[in-house]
């Protein structure tokens, strides 16, 4: 593909990968120039800045973006794409050069961490469109979108703790999981999925599109970003000893077979929290609030280079 005929907008989160994006940006910029990309770029200046950068660039007729960062940066770019109404979302294409901590989304799509190899994938120009999840929190009209995995409960609690361990790399999520075990309390919830109502004490509820989260964990059973369905896992009242005993199963995906875990394929799910203390909700590793949620799917809404 002729990269010169497209205008690219490169979004760099200087904080991703514990500052690696900022450190390696001169090298990546040189590689993009060597590969004849014609681009403008911006560093994000604050947490949700990518959303505004995407809106502004789309107004200026940019249709091709490159994300330099981790799962959080991609999440914000996706939210920028999903919350504009200038063009159909699937007409905006995103290439990813992963420099995050977990880098979980790229694992599903086999996008390499090597800069040159990731750039070659973008240059080649192959595109795919995956499904996007839509979360409405407490019935608010402004939804949050996710491209990888969302969850409520223990995983949200881990996300709330993990930030301070990210200097140790992807293991931060495992470390955060172990630390969180000692302070998290299971909560009462009612989940409605495929006309079934499941009530009771809950460790966490996960809604997956792609395969990996939490730095390589596999917490849903049969996620497929292209099948138009959410892959839902309800981890019921597991205690900390059961979690410790099953830690390896979090990484090899067999946790979904555990007796207190139920899984579903569905196009929507609603989760009601029956507690005064609402647990955290996370989407793609970003905390998005607390409360009751409704989750639905938007088929093939996100186009990316692969
Ligand atoms: N200039 C900034 N200052 C502070 N935070 C920022 C800035 N720009 C973006 N962010 C926030 O940085 C957070 C982390 O980014 P990102 O997820 O890309 O990296 P990571 O956490 O290292 O990787 P991963 O999510 O793959 O583990 C995101 O929540 C994003 O909103």
Image (cartoon, helix red, strand yellow):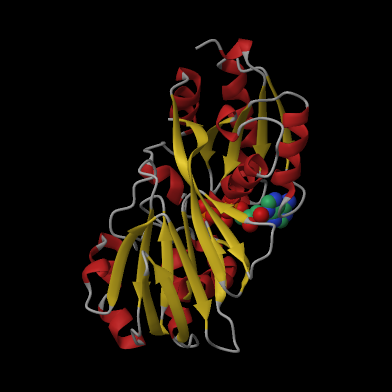
How far from the left and from the top, in percent, is residue 37? 61, 18
Q: Which of 123 and 198 is in front in this view?
A: 198
Q: Residue at x 70, y 45 (%)?
A: 51
Query: Where ligand 1 lies, by image quadrant?
Result: bottom right
Q: Is residue 245 above or below residue 125?
A: below
How far from the left and from the top, in percent, is residue 252? 25, 61
Is residue 233 left or right of 17 when viewed as pictured? left
Q: Which residue is drawn at 57% across and 23% down?
A: 31
Q: Residue at x 42, y 71 (%)?
A: 192
Q: In this view, does 42 lie above or below 133?
A: above
Which residue is outermost to the front?
A: 195
Quadrant of the snapshot with the C terminus: top left
Q: Which of 85 and 1 is in front in this view?
A: 85
The answer to whether residue 218 is visible is: no
The answer to whether residue 153 is visible is: yes
How far from the left and from the top, in percent, is residue 46? 75, 53
Q: Is residue 212 above or below residue 154?
A: above
For residue 161, which quarter of the picture? Answer: bottom right
Is residue 302 left or right of 260 when viewed as pictured? right
**Numbered marks: total:** 0
């Amino acid at each position: 593909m002729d990269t010169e005929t497209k205008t690219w907008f490169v979004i760099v989160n200087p904080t991703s990968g514990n500052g690696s994006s900022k450190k390696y940006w001169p090298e990546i910029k040189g590689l993009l120039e060597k590969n004849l990309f014609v681009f403008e770029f911006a560093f994000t200046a604050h947490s949700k800045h990518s959303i505004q950068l995407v809106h502004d660039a789309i107004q200026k007729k940019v249709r091709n973006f490159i994300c330099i960062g981790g799962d959080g940066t991609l999440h914000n770019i996706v939210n920028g794409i999903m919350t504009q109404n200038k063009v159909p979302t699937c007409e905006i294409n995103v290439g990813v050069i992963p420099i995050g901590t977990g880098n979980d989304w790229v694992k599903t799509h086999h996008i390499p961490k090597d800069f040159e190899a990731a750039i070659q994938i973008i240059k080649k120009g192959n595109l795919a469109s995956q499904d996007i999840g839509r979360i409405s929190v407490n019935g608010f009209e402004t939804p949050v979108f996710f491209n990888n995995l969302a969850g409520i409960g223990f995983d949200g609690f881990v996300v709330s703790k993990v930030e301070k361990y990210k200097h140790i790399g992807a293991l931060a999520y495992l470390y955060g999981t172990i630390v969180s075990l000692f302070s998290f309390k299971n909560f009462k919830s009612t989940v409605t999925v495929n006309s079934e109502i499941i009530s009771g004490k809950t460790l966490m509820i996960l809604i997956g599109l792609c395969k990996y989260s939490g730095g390589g964990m596999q917490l849903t059973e049969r996620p497929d970003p292209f099948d138009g369905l959410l892959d839902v896992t309800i981890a019921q009242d597991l205690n900390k000893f059961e979690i410790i005993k099953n830690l390896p199963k979090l990484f090899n995906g067999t946790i979904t077979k555990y007796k207190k875990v139920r899984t579903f394929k569905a196009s929507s799910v609603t989760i009601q929290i029956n507690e005064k203390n609402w647990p955290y909700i996370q989407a793609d590793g970003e905390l998005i609030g607390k409360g009751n949620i409704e989750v639905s799917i938007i088929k093939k809404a996100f186009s990316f280079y692969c």
